Amino acid sequence: RVLVVEPVAPDGAVRLELRHPSTLPVPDVRAYLGRTLDAGADATGDALPAGSPIEAWTYGADASAAIADETRWAGLRTIATSLDDRDAGLAIEAVALANWHATHAFCPSCGSPTEVVSSGWARRCLEEDRLRFPRTDPAVIVLVTDDEDRVLLGSNAMWEQDRFSVLAGFVEPGESLEAAVVRELVEETGLTVDRVEYLGSQPWPFPASLMCAFRARVAHGASTMPVPDGEEILELRWFDRDGLRDALGRVALPGETSIARWMLEEWYGGPLASSMPWSTS
């Protein structure tokens, strides 16, 4: 979670609370994020000159002691679409680093404790003197269409009923992104696809993914009858645009924070307002 200022603007915009170090207790972990390009102000209204360093400070369960009036802790998935570009970038970077530090207090090679070095961008094993750096796990996320331009959505075994999204999976060692698209779809849907087209990417620090978005089409002459693998994917459905619009009251789509939602709306040609919320944390 990140510390934010309650909305005060008419548009309800949310801002990260940038606070002076003197107003906060000593953090569990601190990491350097960069410097401001323009002059501004922190959450208390004090001047923030151009070139001011910005750090991410991480706290444990006692962090509530550091919260001032008119601020709150908020989950990144909940507020990301309400942040401006600067605050969204800072929040994603801070959460990604915090997640990595939380799981790397000990060396993965020998189990010895590690210490934070390099301004929060590495940890050093106290036994082997070996440096460990934050990792990012690439994953592909794919919008699959057929010759009728229908979109294929799946329901994951870990989700509640009636939640559907585009298909996704991690890239395996030695595998290209395009090969991962083809493999994942064969494994999860039984479909053979081609015409794999890159769309964009999104950092997804839950805990450390980079979502690489693609569009793919069922190969010419191949079956369009999807078969869920029964382990990760329990249900698969084809939707045309009218069918997806009509299902919005019965089907939950990915949250607005995710690239999956952007992919669907690009295919659909406009916003999709599902009345069934996708749970966030």
Image: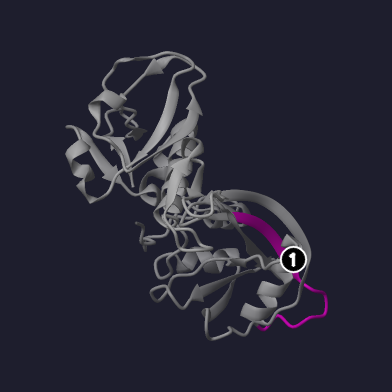
Q: Is residue 220 magenta?
A: yes
Residue at the spot 31% in from the left edge and 29% down from the top edge: 10
Q: How is the image coloured?
A: one colour
Seen at 64% across and 82% down, the residue is: 226
Residue 41 position in % (x across, y down): 35, 18
Q: Position of residue 165 (x, y in %)?
A: 52, 66
User: Magenta segment range?
Assistant: 211-225
Using the rendered image of the protein, determine whether residue 150 is visible from the camera's viewpoint. Answer: yes
**Residue 181 figure quarter:** bottom right
Q: Is residue 148 visible?
A: no
Q: Position of residue 143 (x, y in %)?
A: 64, 63
Q: Nearer the viewer, residue 210 or 278?
A: 210
Above or below: residue 4 compared with residue 153 = above
Q: Give whichever of 121, 252 is nearer the camera.
A: 121
Point 68% across, 52% down: residue: 199
Residue at figure coordinates x 36%, y 58% from the top left: 280
Find residue 169 and report its image quarter.
bottom right
Return the residue at label 1.
Answer: 174
Q: Quadrant of residue 25?
A: top left
Q: Could you tell me which secondary element the residue under label 1 belongs to?
A: loop
Q: Amino acid at mark 1?
A: Gly
Q: Does the stretch in magenta take in 17?
A: no
Residue nearer the viewer, 164 or 26? 26
Q: Where residue 156 sits: x, y (%)?
A: 49, 75
Compared to residue 149, the image places residue 233 above or below, namely below
